[in-house]
Amino acid sequence: MANYKDYKIATLGSHTALQILKGAKDEGFETIAICKRGNTKPYESYKVADKIIEVDDFKEYFQIEQQLIDEKAIIIPHGSFVAYIGAEEVQNVKAMHYGSKGILEWESDRSKERKWLLDADLKLPKVFDSPEDIDRPVIIKFHGAKGGQGYFLANSPEEFHERFKEFPETEDQIAIQEYIVGVPVYSHYFFSPLTDELEVMGFDKRYESNADSIGRIAAKDQVDVGIRTTYTITGNVPIVLRESILPKIFEMGENVVKASQKLTDKGLYGPFCLEGIIDPNLDYFVFEISARIVAGTNPYINGSPYTRLRYDEPMSTGRRIAREIKTAIESDQLDKILG
Ligand code: AMP
Ligand code: AMP
């Protein structure tokens, strides 16, 4: 039997690295954190990294990659990995990479992503091809916007043009989506190709500035001071869903995995997240999928209420990844989970 101790687990020091490295250590792996010079403190203080490799910029990943290969490190991609290295550059990663690279192409292109989610029978907010068609509240999203900064709302073509004047972007650099009035719910999943089973790991909502602070002041003051809504992510808040919604949550996750298997060779596996809004009719409108671990799992380093039902030990998504890798190594199926 192959020995998992021959392998290490590595990730970039940001996003969900604390959870990933802690989970790896709990499963018995040695760990490596690749950190920006000056940002090593959390990884030292929380004692999650056996080794720290410092870089001036995460873009230097390819310059230190050989070290990871020499150490037999398996790299765990997360939101910052894709954000800093770039969805296209990820295809050039030569170190062992946990997760499917093929599916990233479907996730990072808005129209491909939409086709995938529609194939999975999910409800999606309506998309407007032209601003002239706006006939209800819409949210305008800029391609590649970091953390929802600069999004704005409009109710009509006139309102759209009035606001859009302020931005340097052209109309082909934006997406116009129906604005769903409801509560944001981000559903965290884990699909194992080793057992063919989908697990629901937990839920969160984001804590966004200033969207989550506008309700703290009177509507009149919002108008007087001219406050505009932005969605800059600052953290995550755990939530527990009404139990009768759970069957639908499982079904949605299973449909997304099934649909992905028609798109790429191995399809989607490992952690992923459906991001959307639940409206007063309990319809769940999904506006995005993340095909990897999301930071909304961070409140659950000690396990979520849902993982507690399945596991008699603290099971974060980071630890679940390490457990999967360990099982794959020991059963000689690593090729099933590396992409
Ligand atoms: P950072 O490493 O914090 O600069 O984040 C890199 C990317 O991950 C950005 O595109 C963020 O939007 C996303 N991200 C970081 N933290 C979170 C979070 N807590 N929740 C959701 N997305 C996040
Ligand atoms: P995103 O950058 O796509 O994750 O969106 C950032 C934030 O904008 C989300 O967390 C939601 O609060 C909000 N949002 C995005 N799309 C919609 C939508 N179609 N309807 C309502 N709110 C949305």
Image (cartoon, rainbow, N blue to C red):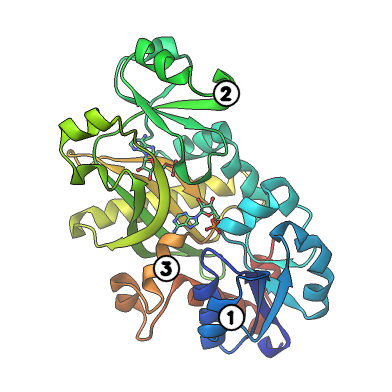
Q: Along the horizontal axis of the image, is 332 left or right of 106?
A: right
Alpha-carbon span between mark 2 and mark 1: 50 Å
Q: Amino acid at mark 1?
A: Thr
Q: Amino acid at mark 3?
A: Asn
- From what the image shows, is residue 208 above or below residue 133? below
The local secondary structure at tag 3 comes to: helix
Residues marked 2 and 1 touching at CB (< 8 Å): no
In-front residue for pair 123/150: 150
Rate crowding at label 2 as few (under 14), some (14 to 19) or many (20 or more) other CA atoms within 10 Å.
few
Rate crowding at label 1 as few (under 14), some (14 to 19) or many (20 or more) other CA atoms within 10 Å.
some
- Can residue 70 be seen in this snapshot? yes
**On-image quarter of the N terminus:** bottom right
Q: Residue 168 got which mark?
A: 2
Q: Residue 327 got which mark?
A: 1
The local secondary structure at tag 2 comes to: loop
Q: Quadrant of residue 301?
A: bottom left
Q: Along the horizontal axis of the image, is 71 left or right of 164?
A: right
Q: Residue at x 60, y 52 (%)?
A: 267
Alpha-carbon span between mark 1 and mark 3: 23 Å
Residues marked 3 and 2 touching at CB (< 8 Å): no
The local secondary structure at tag 1 comes to: helix
Q: Residue at x 37, y 31 (%)?
A: 125
Task: Classify mark 2 as within 8 Å of ligand 2 or not, answering yes or no.
Answer: no
- Can residue 266 be seen in this snapshot? no
Sequence-wise first label, 1 or 3: 3
Foreground mark, 3 or 2?
2
Sequence-wise first label, 2 or 1: 2
At which x and y percent is residue 55?
Answer: 73, 67
